[in-house]
Image (cartoon, rainbow, N blue to C red):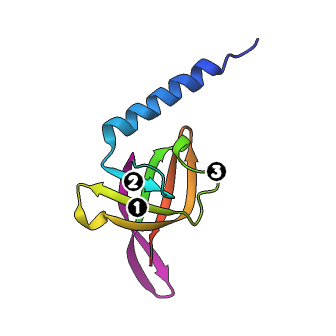
Amino acid sequence: MSLVLAPVAAVEASVDAGVIGVLANCTASIAGAPSVGGIFDREYAQANVGDYGMASTAPALTVQRAVVPVQPYGLVVVIDATAALEDRGRYIVREARPDGGLIVLLLELAP
């Protein structure tokens, strides 16, 4: 029995584009490229440091994988427009997590 994967890939790409199209809450430019729609999130993050805890936010951007260079680490991402003004600005990609046709870029505020 042989599986035909091409139609599945096409369906996945269509679904991913639809997800970004409906849920996008920002536009972002990655490494100077034209802006694309994405899902920006600043999830609360907590870490234990010895006997003490430390809290921060973990900014992340989810976009279609096709708009991101193969090696995105260290690239500058500019969040152009979001619902929250405080999220706008320059970030550096610190980690990339591919997820099918999407990719989650973990960001750090640029100096």
Cα–Cα span, label 3 and label 2: 17 Å
Type of amino acid under label 1: Val
- Where residue 94 sits in the image (x, y, percent)? 55, 66
Q: Is residue 34 left or right of residue 65?
A: left
Residues at marks 2 and 1 touching, judged by CB atoms closer than 8 Å:
yes
* Residue that carries the numbered disc 3 in the rendered image: 70
72 w.r.t. 10: above or below: below
Mark positioned earlier in the residue sequence (2 or 1): 2
Residue 103 magenta: no
Type of amino acid under label 3: Val
Type of amino acid under label 2: Ala
The residue stretch that appears in magenta: 36-57
In the depicted view, which residue is nearer to us: 2 or 7?
7
Mark positioned earlier in the residue sequence (3 or 1): 3
Residue drawn 65% across the image and 21% down it? 5
* Residue that carries the numbered disc 1 in the rendered image: 78
The residue furthest top is 1
